[in-house]
Image (tube, grey):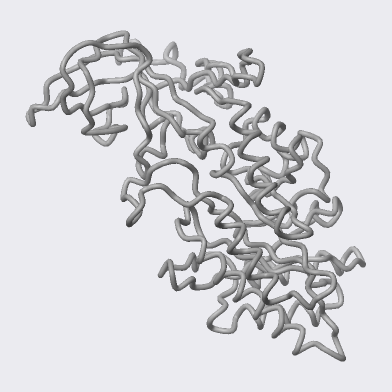
């Protein structure tokens, strides 16, 4: 897999400019689950992104890179006691996902004799999308989110400072974010109205999560224009709505965003080599590549752009690209029109920078090297090719199971 430094920086700077030119205070969190290669994370931290993590593993990755707890946003439905203890000790910001987590964090804060600033994650229905990620956070429409917010406000050891919503992934409609912003502001107003004069809870942060699309193409195309809107359209929808609703509030709440795919997807390319061809019963050509769903997990949902690494002469015909795995679902693309590629030809699949190096799997093949093409044209290895020693390192073979221990009469 090849990443391009210039594309990563360009995407990060474009997003920053789109929002900071429209809103006075914006905090950007890089979504570690999207791609946690050190070089990619480090580059985006250089560009001013904080860390947004959904597990203690990702939290450890950010701390290992030197990111202090105060620059880490903690999400996810599973935050064990040990991780929550660390967030308190190191000043990380927790966005509560459910009541059991709220109770546990409150207990840990009480034990330490401190008050901890927190946010709550809200799941809500954006009518323009017609779906909601109900498995995360407190439900807005039922009133559960308000109940959770007031519960935090009543705590002596938790302080509600933010509300958070993440609509989903690859959201094609900027107006969904406008609606999300409107509902979060409504929640803020309800909380502050209920607490005014006795608890006096004032919320300082509105977090609209991520989900902004990349230049990729969905397997089920978007209606109308197949290309998603530019990031500026999302910034305009969000920031205009916040200004309209909160324009008389001084200071305005901090706007927080947790971006992933929109920053790194377009920067990644998978370079494969043809290892074989065949004629299918449909008449189409089948092409076997040395990389498949083990590396390119997102081929389930996206029609990755395909181009050849060299000129190939001959007539174009329907072609299906398969991977090397011994499983029938290992198909990467097609049918698409290609000339007659043969063994040794390079086939490139583009816009693969998001989720593939976090979701790739160890099945039947070793994982390849990952390199970064730097802005000055140099090539840096940022993850070496895997070896069998890497695969087997965590294992332990008890002596009684070693092949040499097999009785001679069973050999």
| Left/right of residue 290 with respect to residue 341 in the rendered view | right
Q: Quadrant of residue 237?
A: bottom right
Measured as percent of width and height from the top left, residue 81 is found at 73, 57
Measured as percent of width and height from the top left, residue 326 is found at 28, 27
Report the number of discs.
Answer: 0
| Left/right of residue 114 with respect to residue 355 in the rendered view | right
Front position in the image: 255 or 94: 255
Residue drawn at x 80%, y 76% as measured from the top left? 249
In this rendering, the answer to whether 399 lies above or below 191 is: above
Q: Quadrant of the C terminus?
A: top left
Front position in the image: 371 or 110: 371
Farthest right residue?
Answer: 113
Measured as percent of width and height from the top left, residue 389 is found at 55, 16
In this rendering, the answer to whether 352 lies above or below 51 is: above
Farthest top residue?
Answer: 344
Front position in the image: 339 or 195: 339
In this rendering, the answer to whether 265 lies above or below 24 is: above
| Left/right of residue 370 with respect to residue 88 in the rendered view | left
Residue drawn at x 37%, y 42% as measured from the top left? 302
């Amino acid at each position: 897999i090849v990443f391009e430094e210039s594309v990563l920086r360009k995407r990060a700077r474009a997003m920053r400019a789109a929002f900071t030119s429209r809103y006075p205070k914006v905090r950007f969190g890089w979504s570690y689950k999207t791609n946690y290669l050190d070089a990619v994370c480090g580059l985006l931290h250089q560009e001013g992104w904080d860390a947004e993590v959904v597990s203690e593993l990702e939290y450890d990755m950010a701390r290992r890179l030197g990111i202090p707890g105060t620059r880490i946003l903690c999400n996810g439905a599973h935050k064990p006691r040990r991780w929550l203890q660390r967030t308190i000790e190191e000043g990380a910001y927790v966005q509560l996902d459910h009541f059991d987590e709220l109770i546990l964090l409150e207990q840990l804060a009480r034990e330490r004799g401190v008050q901890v600033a927190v946010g709550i994650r809200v799941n809500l229905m954006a009518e323009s999308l017609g779906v909601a990620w109900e498995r995360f956070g407190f439900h807005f429409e039922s009133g559960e989110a308000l109940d959770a917010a007031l519960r935090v406000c009543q705590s002596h050891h938790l302080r509600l400072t933010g509300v958070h919503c993440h609509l989903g992934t690859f959201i094609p409609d900027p107006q969904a974010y406008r609606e999300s912003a409107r509902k979060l502001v409504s929640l803020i107003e309800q909380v502050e109205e209920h607490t005014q004069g006795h608890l006096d809870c004032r919320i300082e942060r509105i977090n609209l999560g991520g989900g902004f699309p990349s230049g990729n193409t969905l397997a089920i195309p978007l209606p109308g224009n197949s290309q998603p809107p530019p990031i500026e359209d999302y910034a305009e929808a969000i920031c205009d709505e916040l200004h309209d609703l909160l324009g008389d509030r001084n200071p305005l709440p901090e706007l927080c965003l947790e971006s992933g795919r929109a920053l790194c997807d377009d920067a990644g390319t998978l370079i494969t080599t043809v290892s074989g061809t065949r004629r299918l019963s449909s008449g189409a050509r089948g092409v076997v590549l040395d990389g498949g769903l083990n590396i390119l997990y997102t081929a389930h949902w996206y029609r990755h752009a395909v181009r050849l690494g060299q000129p190939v002469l001959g007539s174009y015909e329907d072609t299906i690209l398969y991977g090397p795995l011994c499983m029938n679902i290992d198909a990467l693309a097609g049918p698409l029109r290609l000339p007659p590629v043969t063994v040794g030809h390079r086939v490139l699949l583009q816009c693969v920078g998001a989720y593939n190096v976090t979701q790739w799997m160890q099945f039947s093949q070793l994982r390849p090297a990952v390199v970064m093409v730097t802005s000055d044209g140099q090539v840096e290895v940022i993850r070496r090719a895997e070896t069998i020693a890497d695969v087997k390192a965590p294992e332990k073979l008890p002596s009684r199971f070693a092949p040499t221990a097999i009785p001679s009469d069973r050999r």
